[in-house]
Image (tube, helix red, strand yellow):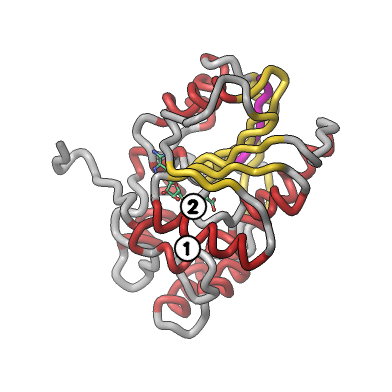
Amino acid sequence: MTDRTTPRIDNDIYNRLADSWWDENGFLHILKTLANPWRLPYFQRVIRHLEVEPRGRRALDVGCGGGLLAEEFATMGFVVTGVDPSEPSLDAARAHAAKKGLIIDYRPGYGDHLPFANESFDVVYCCDVLEHIRSWDAVIDDIARVLRGGGVFLYDTINRTTFSKLVVVKLMQEWRLTSIAPANLHSWDMFIKPRELKASLERHGLRSQDIRGMSLNVNPVQLVASARLYKTGRISGAELGRRLGAKEGSNLALSYMGYALK
Ligand SMILES: C[S@@+](CC[C@H](N)C(=O)[O-])C[C@H]1O[C@@H](n2cnc3c(N)ncnc32)[C@H](O)[C@@H]1O
């Protein structure tokens, strides 16, 4: 039951806004121009560093949404399966992959009940998903189960700090003049501190190897100005993501990404 002290999280957003995953003007498309340029080069670097040859290797995308990352992993040569509870998002993902001529197996499912046998994937990744699931520790448990021994787990999520409360919840979601995200997209109490995630990984047999942070290419004034431009329809979601210009850095106060080995 939800009360005043337990903020709600609205994961129905991914059903209602599923048409926006691949729409330049759409809200969910912001992830493509904001998050992908930050996390994808890092994941590719990790994969090269570990000398994983993508061709023919099985990769699982947990909480794949509209397939913004699944398509990138398929293009790298992985045999990709995507899992998500949102059927409209899976429909959008299937339609876009077909348009691009990519073969990706999209399946309905939840991260804590993955519909796969033990040790069936070489790579599993879960990006911008754990902070949307109260039982995220159970998701890590099931990811560890389906990952083969020696396999790699890649992730990104949002840290629970005063800074993330200010930027992700107050500025982006709550304040009338700057809010660009749907209400209850995020709930600050569900954000995850790196040490909490690291402990969960270790508990489930995944050895954390590295954690990297995010820095934005804008100062606070430019951040507010960009949010206003998007909110008033003067720039697209794609352009907003580009303007914020997320880059890899050492500061973990906002979002962070990393990898672990089984
Ligand atoms: C912010 S989106 C991230 C999508 C994608 N991973 C990306 O980064 O482009 C969060 C996704 O998590 C999915 N999700 C919500 N609850 C989930 C659960 N229990 N298990 C797996 N995925 C879930 C949502 O449907 C949504 O597609």
Tell me if mark 2 has few (under 14), some (14-19) or many (20+) residues whose alpha carbon lies within 10 angstroms of its own.
many
Figure quadrant of the N terminus? top left
**Relative side of 173 to 210, left or right:** left
- Is residue 130 covered in magenta? no
- Is residue 259 covered in magenta? yes
Q: Is residue 35 visible?
A: yes
Q: Indicate which disc residue 65 carries.
A: 2
Write the residue at 46% across / 58% down: 91
Direction bottom: furthest residue: 234
Q: Which region shows up in magenta?
A: 257-262
Q: What kind of residue is marked 2? A: Gly
How far across and how far down the image is residue 47, in percent?
Answer: 78, 37
Q: Which residue is mark 1?
A: 28
Figure quadrant of the C terminus? top right
Q: Is residue 222 visible?
A: no
Queried on whether the Cβ of the residue with tag 1 lies below 8 angstroms from ligand 1, the answer reads yes
Write the residue at 47% across / 31% down: 115
Queried on whether the Cβ of the residue with tag 2 lies below 8 angstroms from ligand 1, the answer reads yes
User: Which quadrant of the figure has residue 78?
Assistant: top right
How far across and how far down the image is residue 68, in percent?
Answer: 59, 56
Tell me if mark 1 has few (under 14), some (14-19) or many (20+) residues whose alpha carbon lies within 10 angstroms of its own.
many
